[in-house]
Image (cartoon, rainbow, N blue to C red):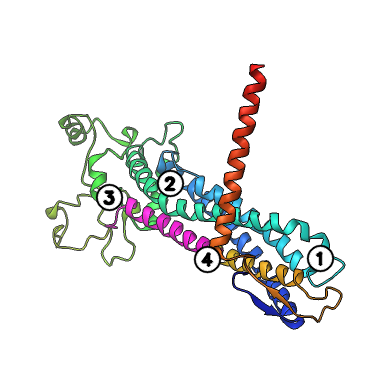
Amino acid sequence: MPFMPVKFTLQKRVKLAQGLWMLYWFSVIVGILLFSLGIFFKVELRKRSEMMDNNESHLVPNLLILVGLLACGVNAFGGKVCHDSLDPMKFPKWKPMLKTYLLLCCGFNVLLLLTAVFCFLMQFAMYLTLAEGLKNSIKFYKDTDTPGRCFMKRTLDMTQIEFRCCGNNNFRDWFEVQWISNRYLDMSNDAVRDRVLSNVEGKYLMDSVPFSCCNPGSPRPCIQHHLTNNSAHYDYDHRIEELNIWTRGCHEALFSYFSGMMSSIGVFIIFTIVLEAVDMAGLKYLCTSLETMEDPENPECESEGYLLEKGVKETFKDVFAKLKTLGKSNQVEEGGDTEGAAT
């Protein structure tokens, strides 16, 4: 007995074909969106690659680009089949391809599911890459004369301004590195020389942050130097006063940005999988309703559409039986090859 049978008249078949045609072309637009999201995600990773030590994975955007292109092709073909389904002259040429096409759609849905899973799983790798990359970016902030790091200062400054963040975990990360280049330090000045010599590693450390950490929304002019020195500023207590610099770390800000993007893309892919499943079910109903027409020469006759020719249990049994048959035939062929080699 067929699984989920539905009776169809000519009017129902026409409505189903028209609705599916529109749904397939909507799926093509969804495919274009997936492709665009992949390009956008790839560009964003390239823009922030310096702060990830160029270790960022492009697996997710590459998969998005691939599934976006496949979605456009697969759904455009499905739309063409639906358009020709009610034309008795055009539809017969598509019938031999439909079984292969539906199997291809199943494989495409599996690829979509894998892409969605990667969108969620790769967030952990993104977290680790950002943590290490930002730590090194702060360390190389001063190396504006070093090849390969010339634009690190500009990149990090623009990131802190755009994402309203400061440092890796917080603004205190700047206290642990020398972020001013030696070429801008007056080594003849006793205060500068003493600060450098007093540090074990010979670094010029201070309780200051770059200008890009400043919060322009603060009513007080930016305090970026001597942040922990209350006596250096009038009416100031760093322990209780709300600092007029960004208090959120760039690691948290960037990870929130990328993880939010990846989660949204994952949810969008799940929606796409549901849409593709509806397309496949609709096309199966349409094809079976055309194949089971009582009088193929009379388009107004009734027919029956279904999702599976047999019940779910019987269908799985048939699939497993075919797989077992294929496995046995492969073993027989291997055995035959061995005997032939022996003779």
Q: Nearer the viewer, mark 3 or mark 1?
A: 1
Kindly identify which residue carries mark 1.
91
**Magenta segment: does it hold 213?**
no
Kindly identify which residue carries mark 3.
169
Q: Earlier in the sequence, mark 4 or mark 1?
A: 1
Most common SS among magenta residues: helix
Q: Nearer the viewer, mark 3 or mark 4?
A: 4
Residue sitting at 30 percent across and 48 percent down? Answer: 168
Q: Secondary structure at mark 1?
A: helix
**Mark 2 and mark 3: Cα distance apart in space:** 17 Å
Dot label at residue 155: 2
Kindly identify which residue carries mark 4.
271
Image x and y of residue 232, in percent: 15, 53
Q: Secondary structure at mark 3?
A: loop
Q: Nearer the viewer, mark 2 or mark 4?
A: 4
Question: Given the image, on which type of amino acid does mark 4 rest?
Answer: Phe
Image x and y of residue 289, in percent: 72, 72
User: On the image, which quarter does residue 187 sit in?
Assistant: top left
Q: Nearer the viewer, mark 4 or mark 1?
A: 1
**Mark 4 and mark 1: Cα distance apart in space:** 30 Å
Image x and y of residue 130, in percent: 37, 46
Q: Earlier in the sequence, mark 1 or mark 2?
A: 1
Q: Earlier in the sequence, mark 2 or mark 3?
A: 2
Count of residue discs = 4
Region in magenta: 246-272
Q: Secondary structure at mark 4?
A: helix
Placement of 290 over or under 247, stated as above or below: below
Placement of 219 over or under 15, stated as above or below: above
Q: Earlier in the sequence, mark 3 or mark 4?
A: 3
User: On the image, which quarter does residue 15 sit in?
Assistant: bottom right
**Mark 1 and mark 2: Cα distance apart in space:** 58 Å
